[in-house]
Amino acid sequence: MIVVAAVAVVLPFAAAFVGMLFGHTASHLLSPLARRLRAPKPGTARRGALVLARRMPANGPALIAVLPVAASTVLTAVLAADQLRSPGTHVGTLTRIPTGTVPIALSLHVDGLASVVAFLVCCVALAVQVYSVAYMRDDPRYSSYAAFVSLFTAAMLLVVLSGDLLVLYAGWEVMGICSYFLIGHYWHDRATSRAAVKAFLVTRLGDVGFLFGIFVLGMAAHSFELRVVLGRLPLMSHTALLAGTLLLLCGVAGKSAQFPLHTWLPDAMAGPTPISALIHAATMVAAGVYVVARLYPAFWFAPTSLAVLGVIAAISMLGAALAALAQDDLKRVLAYSTISQLAYMAAGLAVGTRDGAVFHLLAHGAFKALLFLGAGCVIVTVGSNMMSAMGGLRLAMPVTFWSMTVGFAALAGIPPASGFFSKDTILSQAWQATHRTRSPAFHSYAYTPVRRLGPVHPPRGNGVVDSEGYSFALRHIVHGAPPAIPSWVAWLVLVTGLATAVVTAAYATRTWLVTFFGEKRSDFRPREAAPLMSWPVAVLAVPSLLLGFVGPFSERLRPEWGMAVVSLLCAAAGAGGVYLVWNNDPALDPVRLLGPLRPVLRAAFYVDTAYDVAIVRPVRALARLVVRADARIVDAGVEGSGRGARRLGGLLRATENGNAQAYVSGLFAGMVLIVIAVVVLT
Amino acid sequence: MHLVYPVVIAALLFAVGMYGVLARRNAILVLMSVELMLNAVNLNLVVFDMRWADRLHGGQVLTLFVIVLAAAEVGIGLALVLLIYRNRRTVDVDRLRALAEGDPDPDLDVGAMTDDEGTRR
């Protein structure tokens, strides 16, 4: 299994390098073959798909990008199927790199969580790569684009499957740089390159905390290996756990775009639409949530961190949903909705349902990728991102319309789409968390006098896992002993979760209605997008619709019908309200009812402006000051000494006029002086 | 003969030569003045050889060497002067200033700022 996982990671990585170096060469090599294939055979119906299939072999970068990801998808499907048949943890270590203190292990760690998320990543990446072949067809830099997507896929798989925290961090950073390059794909546009820099800087701010969180946990466990770290959690001091998990939360907030560090995500929509689907909706932003799920036992032992996570999630959830309601740019609506949905996952983790959060992560990955790719189809057809230019696309784009309908239903939590089940799991868990005191399991382990007074065992060598602690962590965390978060956090999560359900349904309905119904609002020719673009959208609609039915058949994800009815009523209230407003006058945008609130929501509560005033401008002023000091003081000193030396040299230079006789005169005068000195002094 | 006469004559010869080297503008006359200085030294060598009555007559031998060297040196010197005349059409040492650097310009470092075509970057 480990070998399968390793090959799944390495394949897209190799594809990235080969695609970057030899993409166009491959096109040249393949062109004779392609020409032969393209020659129409007599008696063959020239259907669209066949024409495309014939055109494919000439596109070297596309082949190099798509085939390895397809292979990785198959391999991760094998991993996931194996975990389904016989759940267990496989750890394989290639080598340990000695660092002087704590070694770094090049290892992979495959368990149920990792294999399922890896499968999701590969599926979305495959859909996006196929979609990009058509979407980026006329782009001169498609080759490097596809290579970066491959590199991103490899890095995400490394994050998901890594068995060592520092190796995980390496993948985490490679994802960050790929995100930067891909947001800035149209770098010649000033706004785009600024968005790329902003995304890079804001996530980097979180990543610093993340790295130090890894250090704290790794030093406390005397190992960076995931299994060892989790196994030694009960031996760590409470301070180390709390500091480590809080620092990890910085990185999580940065990568998953949660409240204080969320501002980069809406701007990141300046990149190509498939990138928004892959990186900024379905996979990379889910990495933060995934890491919390991966290290959930650590958070379980530090309930304060989970409470912080819950508060952050509550703020992000409702704020982002409200901001999504007032946006006009279709992609920004989806971006804010991504922040809001990621906050649902974080909230699920905070109230103690790791499985619910991962369930929502999978469902969200499917339906948000679907929504973004569908939005890409719409944008290509309309030629604008603005919803004020769309409308009336329902009949002209049937595939996109029906797929996106499923996606919006999943987003709003309308049964039977997947979002309903996954969101309900989180909300019902929050309801349970509101009326329970500290978990007995936590007391029995964390507060027993034996543990408090007993000696802390020194680490027993690097390979040895503290099996007692590991099995304890697994027994209680996986089997649902909830962490001991304060009940007010659970109430906060529950109330904002329900309020967000209303707003989510409202903005999903509004976007759906404004985009696909009514009259068309600008001059464009409505038609379905290219088959290579609409098919991945249609394929993604299947899991978006059906993935939720895992819930009722699973022991720990079974929906609670009381909460389901409440959340369904919330969703119906939001959707119905918007529908009534829209039905009055289908030509107008239903958000007009928000009145004076609309610009506030549209600017996302002016958080960006606040950051601009509080951080960006002072930093720029400081930078200008530094530049001036550099020019006036440091440079002036350096240049002044140079100029002084030159002037002194000018004095000497006057004697060197090129007249040999003057030189000889000097020589003679010097000799006379020496002779006189010798005579006088002796 | 008193030692003072030849020594004074040698000193005078050297002074005349020195004056010629420092003051004449014609390169050929400068060369001739150098010869005068050399011969002043030769005179001294011979005089002191006689005065100390050296068995090996080292002073006289050295004088012969100096005469040979002076011949060679004059040959090279005249060749240089000829070449300079061919190139510059002048043998005026005041106008042969190629030893000096060009006009100093404090803001322009010519060598570093031009590329192969000699254009300013």
Image: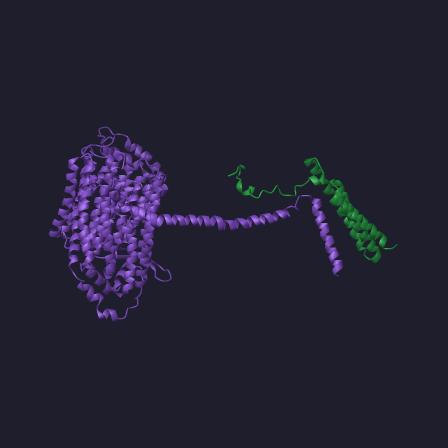
Q: How is the image coloured?
A: by chain
Colour assigned to chain A in the rendering is purple
In the rendered image, residue A183, in percent from the top left (x then y), is placed at: 32, 43
Q: Nearer the viewer, residue B102 or A622?
A: A622
The vertical placement of B48 against A277, above or below, is: below
Left or right? Give the position of A592 relative to A148.
Answer: left
How far from the left and from the top, in percent, is residue A117?
23, 50
List x then y, in percent, for residue B111: 56, 42
Labels in figure, total: 0
Q: Looking at the colours in the rendered structure, which chain would you say is drawn in green?
A: B
Q: Residue furthest front?
A: A596
Please name whichever residue, B119 or A545, is drawn nearer the observer in this view of the structure: B119
Q: Is residue A106 visible?
A: no
Q: Please state the horizontal and vertical placement of residue A536, each as a whole percent of the image.
A: 23, 40
- Nearest to the observer: residue A490 or residue A281: A490
Quadrant for residue A386, please give it.
top left
On screen, A300 above or below A376?
below
- Quarter of the image where one finds residue A165: bottom left
Compare residues B18 and A72 and report the one nearer the observer.
B18
Q: Is residue B77 visible?
A: yes
> Which quarter of the rendered picture does the C terminus of chain A lie within?
bottom right
